[in-house]
Amino acid sequence: MNITEDIYGILPNNWGLLTIGEMVDDGLAHLQTGPFGTNLQASAYKLSGTPVIAVKNIGVNKILLDDAIPRMMIRP
């Protein structure tokens, strides 16, 4: 059994697999919880930028994104 092919399909040879935690640890991604609810101002949402991923957007082995997902501009 090849777990990579079974779960993710055939990947290009130059691709690797990383967990979200590994990406954060390596500085390749940023992860943050909140703000939540009323702490989010409507003016903070943008048409482009970093997607605001909620629990409902997390599926089995994938993140469910569509054009309606809210986005925010994140500044370091």
Image (cartoon, rainbow, N blue to C red):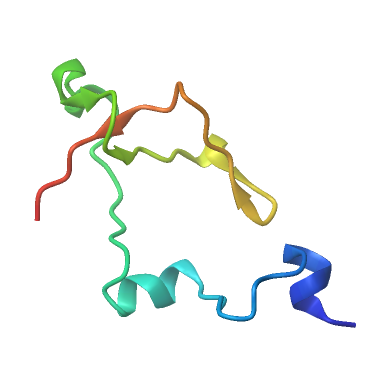
Q: Nearer the viewer, residue 33 or 57?
A: 57
Position of 59 with respect to 76 (left or right) is right
- Residue 10 is situated, as x and y percent measured from the top left of the image, at 76, 69
Q: Nearer the viewer, residue 57 or 8?
A: 8
Residue at 31% from the left image edge and 79% from the top image edge: 26
- Residue 74 is situated, as x and y percent measured from the top left of the image, at 17, 45
- Residue 55 is situated, as x and y percent measured from the top left of the image, at 51, 41
When the figure is inspected, residue 41 is found, relative to residue 15, above or below; the finding is above
Q: On the image, which quarter does residue 27 sit in?
A: bottom left
Residue at 83% from the left image edge and 69% from the top image edge: 6
Position of the N terminus by quadrant: bottom right
Position of the C terminus by quadrant: bottom left
Q: Residue furthest front?
A: 13
Q: Nearer the viewer, residue 50 or 16?
A: 16
Position of 70 with respect to 17 (left or right) is left
Residue at 33% from the left image edge and 70% from the top image edge: 24
Position of 72 with respect to 9 (left or right) is left
Q: Residue furthest top?
A: 42
Q: Residue furthest right?
A: 1
For the image, the number of numbered tags is 0
- Residue 37 is situated, as x and y percent measured from the top left of the image, at 29, 26
Residue at 31% from the left image edge and 58% from the top image edge: 31
